[in-house]
């Protein structure tokens, strides 16, 4: 039996997934634009959340991250938190927009230091603030770099998976091709979890 129908089914599923992502992306940009026109805090929080969803995707992520950074610089306390989460969620072999991640970490460290010292009820002097900011920044930076070995395992898995599918499509049913595709899929998933 030929693997052509199976490959066509996989390609059709990938096309449907891509179309859904494009529709979701357009909907989130529209929501962010609509909420950006309102000035109340609830709308601002909704805009930050919509931009955060976009910043976790491949399409439009850079623009959404830049908008979140601009909102954070303008004084929105949630924007830097959402920006940091989006960058950490999408890194693999490298950290996208590492300079924006550093800026978000520094802003969040200052915000958390002020909150921590304000809870203590003591007057905030610049030395204590600087020390607490350093502690908070160290905690934020301690998230570590992405596991490059995990990403390489995922890349090897993707290569084996696609190679096995290609061999199935070209030659029909084959135990070796099926095993190659299955091992590749396991390596791909395991590598993505590790990275």
Image: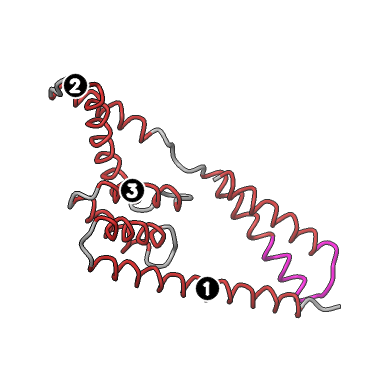
Of helix, strand and loop, which mostly describes the magenta segment? helix
Whether 171 is drawn above or below 159: the answer is below
Name the element at disc 2.
Answer: helix
Name the element at disc 3.
Answer: helix
The residue to which callout 2 is attached is 128
Q: Residue 127, percent across and down? A: 15, 21
Whether 129 is drawn above or below 52: the answer is above
Magenta extent? 161-176
Q: Earlier in the sequence, mark 1 or mark 3?
A: 1
* Image quadrant occupied by the N terminus: bottom right
Q: Residue 20, percent across and down? A: 52, 73
- Bin the neighbour count of mark 3 within 10 Å (Cα to Cα): few under 14, some 14-19, many 20 and up: some
The residue to which callout 3 is attached is 98
Name the residue: 42% across, 36% down: 143
Based on the displayed image, in which of its 4 quarters is residue 57 positioned? bottom left
Residue 127 or residue 24, whichever sits in front: 24
Q: Report how far apart the C-alphas of labels 1 and 3 lie in the structure.
A: 29 Å
């Amino acid at each position: 039996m030929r693997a052509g129908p199976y490959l066509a089914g996989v390609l059709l599923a990938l096309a449907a997934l891509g179309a859904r992502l494009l529709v979701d992306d357009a909907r989130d940009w529209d929501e962010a634009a609509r909420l950006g026109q309102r000035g109340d805090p609830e709308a601002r929080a909704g805009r930050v959340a919509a931009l955060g969803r976009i910043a976790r995707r491949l399409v439009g992520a850079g623009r959404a991250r830049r908008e979140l950074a601009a909102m954070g610089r303008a004084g929105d306390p949630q924007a830097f938190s959402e920006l940091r989460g989006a960058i950490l969620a999408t890194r693999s072999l490298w950290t996208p927009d590492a300079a924006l991640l550093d800026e978000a970490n520094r802003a969040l460290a200052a915000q958390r230091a002020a909150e921590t010292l304000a809870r203590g009820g003591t007057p905030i002097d610049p030395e204590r603030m600087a020390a607490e900011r350093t502690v908070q920044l160290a905690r934020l930076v301690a998230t570590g770099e992405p596991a490059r070995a995990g990403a390489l395992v995922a890349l090897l898995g993707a290569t084996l998976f696609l190679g096995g599918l290609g061999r199935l499509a070209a030659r029909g049913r084959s135990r070796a091709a099926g095993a190659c595709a299955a091992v590749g899929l396991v390596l791909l998933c395991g590598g993505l979890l590790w990275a």
